[in-house]
Image (tube, helix red, strand yellow):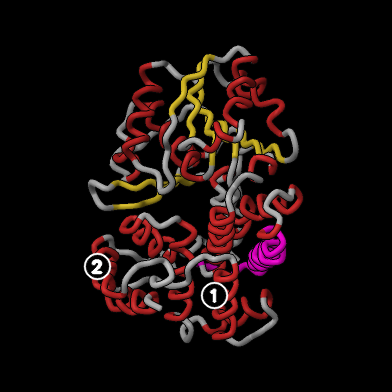
Amino acid sequence: MENFVYYNPTQLIFGKNATDKLGELTSQLGKTVLLVTGKGSVKKYGYFDLVSNQLKSAGCRVIEYDGIKANPLVDDVEKASQIAIEENVDVIVALGGGSVIDSAKIIAVSAASELDPWKIMTWKAKPKKALPLVAVLTLAATGTEMNDAAVLQNHKTGQKIGYVSPLLYPKISFLDPSFTVTVPKNQTAYGIVDLIAHSLEAYFGDGESPLADRFVFSIISDAMENTPELMQNLSDYELRAKIMLDATCALNGITTLGKKVGDWGVHGLGHELSLLYDLPHGASLSIAYPAWLKFHSEKLADKISKLGENVFKTKDVNETIAQFEKFFESIESPINLKQAGISALEEEIIYKQMLKNQVSGIKHKLNAEDLKNIVHCMIG
């Protein structure tokens, strides 16, 4: 087991009516608020009015930036950061899922020091401060509500990349599972795939930590156990709460305690699919993970067998991979390119895109030949 320092300063407020103190607590951080949202669902279902009224009742001036898309763009972050600078914003409030909160994280560090967002993402600019960030989660998936990471894509450079810094931790995150009952079936499924993928990235990372592995097995098992019923009862609060907690725990640091780092190679593979075809993040991962596991089925046989034993009660490597595919298919998340509507003729394009951006893992490095073989495994 590795030496480690565990640091997570985010205050997590979880449960029914969790946002009751949103206005009060946010106003203690600042009075001029940039409220960052997605493309409309938060207004459709009343969450925007609830949050906005809370903030205004606490004496905050609210400036809105809406339209953050899934697979968030640096262009929106640039525009929102400029607004935050011009309006002398004190605090950022992100109301939405992972894309909104990730965007808000980079807005917070960009606006605080008036730095170019993409230079931050590519480590060409090094922020030393951030505006305080408050997150109100509406989708259980990425775990960004309790971690120090953000992902953005840039179509001009042809990249989708992540950035990690202690400056990105939200000050407070409000998690009311009621805010997720309106999430449609497909997005719910993609969120569940994402939390499973985060757990697997930790499991296949660098270092050995039996307790961290037990966290991984428990998170995946809990999600898989509750998902079938949730898919039939999307408005069930208790089931939503369980998945929301699974997603948060999958990427708040506990699954890598005693390890050096997670691998993240599969996320790299998935990012390229999302960049090329605008695939939902979870859909890209349900394609990429089975392909990655198949490619590593001999090299990582012991790890995959242990995973299968603890999650599926089988030590058989191929059966373990098949069980993940079966689960992903059962929630209608694609397990190959064909199911995602992507032609096998695209194989070379995908390979060259991954080669261009040098997709690889931290622990399990991938060379050009590896990438070619993994993409071939994705075809279906």
Magenta-colored segment: predominant secondary structure: helix
Q: Amino acid at mark 2?
A: Ile
Give x and y (percent) for residue 234: 67, 52
Q: Secondary structure at mark 1?
A: helix
User: 236 or 173: nearer the eye?
Assistant: 236
Q: Residue at x 60, y 35 (%)?
A: 45
Label 1, residues with CA under 10 Å away: few <14, some 14-19, many ≥20: many
| 2 relative to 128 in the view: left or right | right
User: 320 or 362: nearer the eye?
Assistant: 320
Q: Secondary structure at mark 2?
A: helix
Give x and y (percent) for residue 295: 42, 80
Q: Residue at x 56, y 55 (%)?
A: 191
Q: Is residue 311 above or below residue 29?
A: below
Residue corresponding to mark 2: 349
| 213 relative to 329 in the view: left or right | right
Residue corresponding to mark 1: 325
- Regarding residue 295, the answer to whether it shows in the image is yes
Label 2, residues with CA under 10 Å away: few <14, some 14-19, many ≥20: few
Q: Write down the quadrant of residue 362 in the picture.
A: bottom left
Residue farthest along the top direction in this orientation = 59
Q: Residue at x 62, y 53 (%)?
A: 247
Q: Mark 1 or mark 2, which is nearer the start of the sequence?
A: 1
Q: Amino acid at mark 1?
A: Glu
Q: Is residue 47 above or below residue 156?
A: above
Residue 74 counted in the magenta span? no
Q: Circles 2 and 1: CB distance less than 8 Å?
A: no
| 271 relative to 17 in the view: left or right | left
Q: Which residues are magenta?
A: 205-230
Q: Write down the quadrant of residue 82 in the picture.
A: top left
Give x and y (percent) for residue 35: 50, 26
- Regarding residue 5, the answer to whether it shows in the image is no
Work out which quarter of the rendered image holds the N terminus and state it: bottom right
